[in-house]
Image: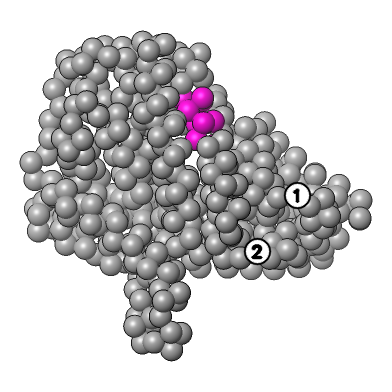
Amino acid sequence: MDLSLFFVAGAGIALLLFLVIALRLPAFLALLVASLSVGLLSGLEPTQVIDSIKNGMGGTLGFVAIVVGLGAILGQILESSGGIERIADSLIRTFGPEKTQWSLGVTGFVVAIPVFFDVAFIILAPLLYGLANRSGRSLLYYAIPLLAGLAITHSFIPPTPGPIAVAELINADLGWVILFGALTGIPAMIIAGPWFGQFVANKIFVAVPEAHRNNPITSDVSSPSFAWVSSIILLPLLLIMLATTAPFVLAQSSPLLTAIRFLGHPFVALSIATILALLIAHTKCDLDKESLLNIANKGLEPAGIVILITGAGGAFKQVLIDSGVGQMLASVFIEAQFSVFILGFLIAAITRIAQGSATVAMITGAGLMAPILQLQPISAPSLGLLVIAISSGATILSHVNDSGFWLVSRYLGMSETNTLKTWTVMTTLISLVGLASCLLISLFL
C-alpha cells in the first residue's frame, strides 16, 4: 500500500471537514478546495488536476442539473397551487381521526417527493397546530409522524436531490433506487413515525406555540383535486420504474421497450409531469402565464445551490479516481472484505455527524465509494440498494450543526434538549432501520 496516498486521502477528508465545520465555508467551495488539494498532493500535474475537476463537474451536472431543476419546478408549482395542502387534507379525511398519525406519515412520505423537506414542513406546520389545538395532545403526537415521512422521502426517493446525486456518482439506476427507497422507507416511517411518535408524545408534552393557538386552518378552495395532485407526483416515479422493469419482460428489439425506455428516462418523465402540473395549475387554479413563470423561476433558486454542491462532489470523486487515491482506498477495503453497504453507511454517517449537512454527507460517501465500485463492480439492483445505504448513513443523528434541527426546534417551540430527545432520536431510528432493511434485502440480491 502506498502510504503517501493513504496520507493524502486522510488529509483531503480532514481538510473538507475543517473547511465546512471550523471555517464555515460553503460546501461548494470547500469541495473544490479539497479536490485541488488532493490532486496536487497526490502528484498530479496542475493541468491534470484542473482537467479532472472539469470532467468530474461536467459529467455529474449533465444529468443532475436537469433532474434537480425539473423536480424543483414541479415542487414549486404544487406548493404555490395549494396542491400540498390538498394532499394532506384528503389523506387525513380518508384515514379518519383515529388514524391521524398514519395519515400524517403517509402525507410526509408523498409530499416530500416533489418538495424540499424544509419547504414542505413549513407549509404543513399550521396543519399540525390545528390538530393539536383540537385534540389537546402533545404537538409531538402529530409532528413526529409527519417529520419521519418527510425526512425519509427526502433522503431515500428521487427526484429529491440527495439520492439523485448519489445515484449519479455511483452510476445507479433510478428505478432500483425508487423501488428500494420505498421498501426500506416504509418500515422506517412506521417505526420512527407513528410508533415512536405515540411513545414520545406520552413522555414529553409540547404545547402549540402561543402565536398559533386556536388559529383556524384556512384552505385554498381553488387548489387542484387530490386525484390530479397525486397523479402528478406519482407519474414520473411510475414511468421511471416501468423503464427499469420492462427489459425483464420485453425483448430487447421490441419497439415498445424502446418507447418505454424513452418515456421512463428521468429527463422525459419529469418533463411530462412538470408540463402536466403547469397545465393543471393554469386551468384548475386560475394561475396566469406570468404567475407560472415566476413560480418556476422561484423553484429554481434553491435548486441552484444543490446543483453546484453536487457538481463539486462529482469533481472530488473524479480527482480521487484520477490521482489513484480512490483506487488505493478501494484496495484496502476490498482486501478487508468489508461490506459495501456498511462501508457506504459509515462514511456518510461519520460525515453527517461531523458537519451536519445530509447532502454533503451523501455526496462525500458516494464520492469515496465510486472508486471502490470500479475495482469491485456490483449488480444494478445492488447499486440501487447502496444509494439507500449511503442515504441512511447521511440521515443519522441530526443535532445542533444541522439546519433541520433548528427548523424543527423553532417551529415546534421546543428546547434544544427536547429536540435532541425527539427529532435527533427519530432521525437515528430512520437511519438504523434503513441500514437494517438494506442488509436484509441484500441477502436476496
Point out residue 98 in the picture as x, y percentages from the top left corner: 22, 25
Q: Is residue 266 visible?
A: yes
What is the quadrant of residue 327 in the picture?
A: bottom right
Closer to the camera in the image, 25 or 215: 215
- Span colored in magenta: 423-431
In the rendered view, does 213 fall on the left or right side of 284? right
Q: Is residue 100 above or below residue 387?
A: above
- The residue indicated by pointer 1 is 338
* In-image side of 5 versus 259 (left or right): right
Report which residue position mark 2 lands on: 378
User: How many neighbours does mark 1 have within 10 angstroms: few (below 14), some (14-19), or many (20 or more)?
Assistant: few
Q: Report the residue at 28% width, 54% height from top.
A: 233
Mark 2 neighbour class, 10 Å CA radius: few under 14, some 14 to 19, many 20 or more: few
Foreground pick, 131 / 360: 131
Q: Nearer the viewer, residue 38 or 157?
A: 157
Helix or strand or loop: what does disc 1 sit on? loop
Q: x, y percentage for residue 173?
A: 51, 64
Quadrant location, the C terminus: bottom right
Residue at left offset 8%, top offset 45%: 222
How far, Cα to Cα, is label 1 from label 2?
Answer: 14 Å
Quadrant where the N terminus is found in the figure: bottom right
Residue 251 falls within the magenta-colored stretch: no
- Where is residue 34? Give x, y as percent: 71, 49
What residue type is disc 2 on? Ile
Whole-percent x, y for residue 271 in the image: 31, 66
Q: Residue at x 45, y 62 (%)?
A: 175
Q: What residue is rendered at 39% in x and 30% in y? A: 193
Magenta stretch: dominant SS?
helix
The amino acid type, in three-letter code, at marker 1 is Phe
Position of 171 compared to 413: left or right? right
Q: Is residue 128 left or right of residue 81?
A: right
Instruction: Locate residue 206: give its quadrant.
Output: top left
